[in-house]
């Protein structure tokens, strides 16, 4: 079993930055592709970014491309999401998730709230 715990959320003004962390325990995530998802009130959860197990490949949703950066430190079993130039529409609960089989996210964190004020 893998336990994922997100941290780093909070309230920030538009244009500001936050760095989310996702720390894993119970089992190493070095073999897992990892993703960051978000869910805004009244909307479905959607992927924000994902990173391959080695960190060599990344994907970003169009809405965050150029502003967010996903990275990982497999030695620390931690995944990060650096969020710059934040917009009010980035307000959501952010979740990290792990997938041993690409696209099949089986482990999820509890989420961290990000609120961007205008």
Image (cartoon, rainbow, N blue to C red):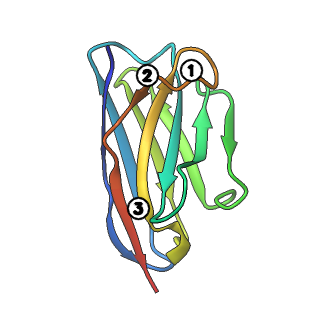
Q: Say which residue label 1 marks.
A: 53
Label 1 and label 2: CA atoms lie apart by 8 Å
Kindly state the secondary structure of the residue where label 1 is placed: loop
Earlier along the polypeptide chain: callout 3 or callout 2? Answer: 3
| In-image side of 6 versus 72 (left or right) | left
Up/down of 38 relative to 14, above or below: above
What residue lies at 55% left-to-right and 72% top-to-bottom? 89
Instruction: Give the numbered dot on residue 74.
Output: 2
What residue appears at the point 42 percent right and 51 percent down from the top-left corner? 94
Horizontal relation, residue 46 to residue 20: left or right: right
Q: Which residue is mark 3?
A: 18
Q: Position of residue 64 (x, y in %)?
A: 64, 59
Up-down: is 52 above or below 22?
above
46 with respect to 42 (left or right): right
As helix, strand or loop, the secondary structure at mark 2 comes to loop
Q: Quadrant of residue 19?
A: bottom left
Give the number of the disc on residue 96: none
Which residue is drawn at the image coordinates 52% and 67% (left, top)? 90
Q: In this rendered view, identify the residue nearer to me: 118 or 43.
A: 43
**Do labels 1 and 3 touch, CB within 8 Å?**
no
Q: Nearer the viewer, residue 79 or 112?
A: 112
Of mark 1 and mark 3, the one earlier in the sequence is 3
């Amino acid at each position: 079993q893998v336990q994922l715990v997100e941290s780093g959320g909070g309230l920030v003004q538009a244009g500001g930055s936050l760095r989310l962390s996702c720390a894993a325990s119970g089992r190493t995530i070095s073999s897992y592709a990892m993703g960051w998802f978000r869910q805004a009130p009244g909307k479905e959860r959607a992927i924000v970014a994902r990173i391959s197990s080695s960190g060599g490949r990344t994907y970003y949703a169009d809405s965050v491309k150029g502003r967010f950066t996903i990275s990982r430190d497999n030695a620390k079993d931690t995944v990060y999401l650096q969020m710059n130039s934040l917009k009010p529409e980035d307000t959501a609960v952010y979740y990290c998730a792990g997938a041993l089989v690409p696209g099949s996210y089986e482990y999820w964190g509890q989420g961290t709230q990000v609120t961007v004020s205008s």
